[in-house]
């Protein structure tokens, strides 16, 4: 994760809280049961299937609110992200509403995610696109 921490530090002026949250978010997704595909499934089961599908597919990403994210991710994951990033929970949710759709979009360039999708490799491969959106 040191490379991602370096990247986050380098863009700190641009993305601020998002840059602080990025390494923690990637780590959470990597450790999530089923990885990115498992997280996408959780969004589908949480009633946000259409929203998360827009992030995976080509075209514009549908917005998501902090409340919707909190309902799907749960307090445990939000608390861990808060602790790892040093941000307050409300700030984590605010930044996730922008960062997570872009991350999922960049991590699924072929329009799908599987359990072995390597979020950090896909992200680094298209980092300029993600950072341009921060």
Image: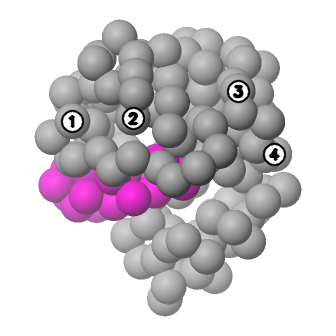
Q: Gap between marks 2 and 4, in whole Å?
A: 24 Å
Colouring method of the image: one colour
**Mark 4 — residue?**
121
Residue 18, position as x, y percentages in the image:
43, 66
Task: Tell me the SS state at disc 4.
Answer: helix
Q: Which residue is depicted at the point 33% across and 26% down?
A: 48
Q: Main secondary structure of the magenta part?
A: helix
Q: Is residue 24 visible?
A: no
Q: Which residue is depicted at the point 40% across and 28% down?
A: 50
Q: Gap between marks 4 and 1, in whole Å?
A: 27 Å
Q: Is residue 19 left or right of residue 10?
A: left
Q: Nearer the viewer, mark 2 or mark 4?
A: 2
**Mark 3 — residue?**
112
The correct choice, above or below, for 47 with respect to 17 in the image is above
Start-end of magenta stretch:
83-103
Residue 80, position as x, y percentages in the image:
34, 38
Instruction: Name the residue nearer the viewer: 50 or 131.
Output: 50
Q: Nearer the viewer, mark 4 or mark 1?
A: 1
Q: Is residue 95 magenta?
A: yes
Counting residues from the start of the chain, the first of labels 1 and 2 encountered is: 2
Residue at the far front: name it.
59
Counting residues from the start of the chain, the first of labels 1 and 3 encountered is: 1
Confirm or deny contact between disc 1 and disc 2 (CB under 8 A): yes
Task: Tell me the SS state at disc 1.
Answer: helix
The correct choice, above or below, for 123 with respect to 12 in the image is above
Residue at the far bottom: name it.
13
Residue 126, position as x, y percentages in the image:
78, 59
The correct choice, above or below, for 24 with respect to 29 in the image is below
Q: Which residue is depicted at the point 69% across and 25% down?
A: 113
């Amino acid at each position: 994760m040191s490379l991602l921490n370096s990247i986050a530090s380098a863009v700190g002026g641009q993305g601020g809280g998002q840059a602080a949250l990025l390494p923690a978010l990637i780590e959470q997704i990597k450790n999530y049961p089923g990885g990115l595909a498992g997280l996408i499934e959780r969004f589908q089961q949480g009633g946000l299937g259409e929203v998360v599908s827009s992030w995976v597919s080509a075209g514009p990403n549908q917005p998501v609110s902090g409340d919707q994210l909190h309902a799907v991710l749960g307090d445990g994951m939000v608390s861990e992200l808060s602790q790892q990033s040093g941000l307050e929970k409300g700030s984590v949710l605010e930044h996730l509403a922008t960062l997570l759709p872009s991350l999922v979009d960049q991590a699924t360039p072929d329009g799908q995610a599987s359990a072995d999708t390597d979020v950090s490799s896909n992200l680094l491969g298209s980092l300029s696109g993600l950072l341009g959106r921060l």
